[in-house]
């Protein structure tokens, strides 16, 4: 095996993965941000994306359960609080349910997970399992899609505000908060990966983990587009337009 890349070259390699593979390039996001989604397509996205949001703190808790270093646990703990909230502040999951309410969905229905597509469930569960079972370096590297998240949140906020009546500051609070949370998280995660991936084997593992995570995100949008845009084929038991409304 050839020698390790320099720290700078390896970081550039990770950033290329995002430029080529991040789900901001998916046609569904282009449709959503450009105002071409119907309200029911937006609702389907909210229902299915909730499952991913709800599993992020579970993923992080699984990761923390494996860590022996208290300093690393302390550094990672804020991610759980960002999504679950605290006694003093609302978290990302609650903010997502406000978006659900804004698009006319019953938050209790969304939180039940009853309408989630099987492919969404399989992809997200695979990510949680990956973080629980793979080496710690790979688990952290998989989170580095956060490198590319602020840009998509900025485009999403602008696009939703321009094209959809439901888009209000309260409805979009999840995305606005992630503009400040994600850079903090990724600064730590990227530093960890660059510090610990010092052999070519470790760098390849970390890069592969990031590719895997981009595929998890892409697969969710593929399933959503197939079920609710074209050809509109849905398995039994998933959310149907008209269900779970306020």
Image (tube, grey):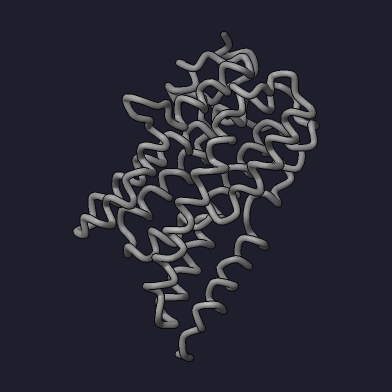
User: Percent from the top left, x then y, of residue 15?
Assistant: 60, 66
Left or right: 87 with respect to 28? left
Say above or below: 72 vs 87: below
Is the N terminus in the top left, top right, bottom left or bottom right quadrant?
Answer: bottom left
Does 141 sit above or below residue 124? below
Q: Quadrant of residue 71?
A: bottom left
Name the residue at the bottom extreme. Answer: 2
Residue furthest top as drawn:
246
Residue 22 in sight here:
yes
Whether residue 100 sits left or right of residue 29 in the image: it is: left
Residue 132 % position (x, y): 31, 53
For the point 45% across and 75% down, the residue is 203
In x, y percent, where is residue 245?
58, 11
Instruction: Look at 63% across and 41% down and name the residue there.
Output: 153
Q: Is residue 171 left or right of residue 59?
A: right
Residue 230 can be seen, yes or no? no
Residue at image coords 55%, 77%: 8
Which residue corresponds to the image point at 53% horizontal and 20% vertical from the top-left? 98
**The C terminus lies in quadrant:** top right
Residue 140 position within the rendered picture, expressed as x and y whole percent measured from the top left: 40, 59
| In-front residue for pair 5/181 | 181
Residue 42 versus residue 77 in the image, above or below: above
Query: Number of callouts in the render?
Result: 0
């Amino acid at each position: 095996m050839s020698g390790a890349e320099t720290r700078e070259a390896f970081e550039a390699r990770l950033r290329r993965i995002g430029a080529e593979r991040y789900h901001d390039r998916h046609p569904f996001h282009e449709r959503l941000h450009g105002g071409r989604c119907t309200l029911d397509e937006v609702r389907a996205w909210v229902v299915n994306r909730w499952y991913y949001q709800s599993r992020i703190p579970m993923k992080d808790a699984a990761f923390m359960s494996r860590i022996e270093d208290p300093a690393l646990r302390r550094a990672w703990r804020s991610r759980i609080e960002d999504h679950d909230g605290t006694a003093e502040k609302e978290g990302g999951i609650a903010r997502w349910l406000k978006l659900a309410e804004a698009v006319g969905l019953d938050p209790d229905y969304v939180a039940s997970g009853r309408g989630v597509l099987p492919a969404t469930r399989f992809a997200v569960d695979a990510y949680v399992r990956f973080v629980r079972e793979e080496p710690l370096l790979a688990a952290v590297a998989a989170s580095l899609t956060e490198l590319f998240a602020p840009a998509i949140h900025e485009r999403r906020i602008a696009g939703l505000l321009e094209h959809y009546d439901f888009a209000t500051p309260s409805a979009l609070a999840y995305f606005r908060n992630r503009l400040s949370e994600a850079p903090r998280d990724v600064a730590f995660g990227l530093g960890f990966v660059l510090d610990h991936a010092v052999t070519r084997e470790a760098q390849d593992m970390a890069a592969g983990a990031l590719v895997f995570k981009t595929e998890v995100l892409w697969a969710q949008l593929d399933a959503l587009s197939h079920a609710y845009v074209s050809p509109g084929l849905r398995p039994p038991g998933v959310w149907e337009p008209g269900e779970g409304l306020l």
